[in-house]
Image (cartoon, helix red, strand yellow):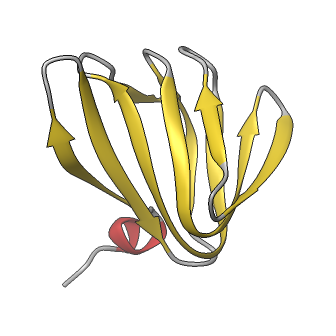
Amino acid sequence: MDTIQEKILPKLLLLDKKDQHKVLRVTGEAGMSMPEHISTKEAVVIIQEGEATFEIDHKNYNLKKDDVFIIPAGAKHKLDIQSNFQAVVIMDIDSQIEFIN
């Protein structure tokens, strides 16, 4: 049985890993959110489906299918999903996602 935590957070899946970068898929349903976190290195997010709001440094960015967004290294950000969502995230092979709390 899924825990409540698994139902609330978007899912992250490693799609590919190369010498210099890795590619993750992020999927989630409307109402899911990812709490404030950082990427230790720059990340590129490509929205494939749905809509979401990224909050970075207290500024909101509404993103939808086909939008591309660059998250600077160390920038505190969070994700709130408005409609069924899928994105790919490309980041340095050594980059880590670190939650703030």
x then y, percent, for residue 32:
56, 68
Vertical order, 7 against 20 (above or below):
below
Residue 69 falls left or right of residue 85 = right
Residue 101, visible in the rendered structure = no
Residue at 41% x, 27% y is 98
The total number of labels drawn is 0
The foreground one among 91 and 32 is 91
Quadrant of res 1: bottom left
Residue 37 falls left or right of residue 51 = left
Residue 62 falls left or right of residue 17 = right
Quadrant of res 93: top left
Residue at 37% x, 27% y is 91
Vertical order, 53 against 61 (above or below):
below
Residue 62, visible in the rendered structure = yes
Residue at 42% x, 42% y is 89
x then y, percent, for residue 4:
38, 73
